[in-house]
Amino acid sequence: MNKHYAPIAALLTLFCCALPANAQTTTESKPVSQIPITSAQSPDIPVFQKIEDNWSVSINHRDQYGLELVLSPLFVEISSFGEVSTRDQVVAHLINSDDKTLTLDSHVITVRLLGDVAVVNGTYTLKHKVNGNPAEERGIYTHLYQKVRAGWLCINSQQTQLRENSQSKTKKKSGSGDELPFHVPLFSK
């Protein structure tokens, strides 16, 4: 090894060895295994439900400015069909859409705060027309928010459409009673 790089290599080795020991605890010195991954009782759920409600109202009333107040200029959406759109494309589609029946309803299930970033998971129902016929899409979403000034702006959205499964409606729930860390409620018609 070149003698000029030896001090840098020694510092990197020292830094890398110290990193794993520090990464195992949080600022409160709790082991990582004791920190809950997700919780449906987060005090932040009402805050983000209000933001999601504003998003839905903007879609339902074709409100360009309301939608721009929720979506970051850096916003990227990946639809349930795999289509990638920017904020400008989403707003343009909202304004230019001939489908006047388009409505969105979403419900926040979990919120995880990671500093100035929040990961929000929830369910949605999208009513619209397909080939002139009414259609309803139900699914789950993950929205990534960034804290900007005194509010939150969505920077990324990913939707996954739920498949209709007639067998799942007839099956009975298991009686184990164990609570899972994340649960998406099934929709009923």
Image (cartoon, rainbow, N blue to C red):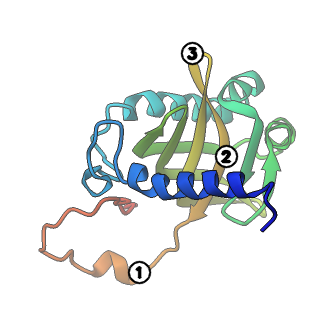
Q: Residue 47, position in %: x, y?
A: 43, 27
User: Secondary structure beneath disc 1?
Assistant: helix
Q: Is residue 158 above or below residue 112?
A: below
Q: Residues within 10 Å of mark 2 (few under 14, many from 20)?
A: many
- Cα separation between marks 1 and 2: 32 Å
Which residue is depicted at the point 38% across and 35% down?
A: 45
Answer left or right for 50 relative to 13.
Answer: left
Instruction: Identify residue type, mark 2.
Output: Asn
Seen from the viewer's position, the closer of residues 58 and 132 is: 58
Task: Name which quarter of the figure residue 69 lies in.
Answer: top right
Q: For residue 150, which numbered disc appears in the image?
A: 3
Q: Is residue 159 above or below residue 54?
A: below
Seen from the viewer's position, the closer of residues 90 and 6 is: 6
Q: For residue 30, which numbered disc appears in the image?
A: none
Q: Residues within 10 Å of mark 1 (few under 14, many from 20)?
A: few
Answer left or right for 115 relative to 56.
Answer: left
Seen from the viewer's position, the closer of residues 65 and 17 is: 17
Q: Residue furthest toward the front?
A: 3
Answer left or right for 24 relative to 155.
Answer: left
Task: Name which quarter of the figure residue 97 lies in.
Answer: top right
Q: Residue 176, position in %: x, y?
A: 13, 73
Judged by depth in the image, the label closer to the viewer, 3 or 1, is: 3
- Cα separation between marks 3 and 2: 19 Å
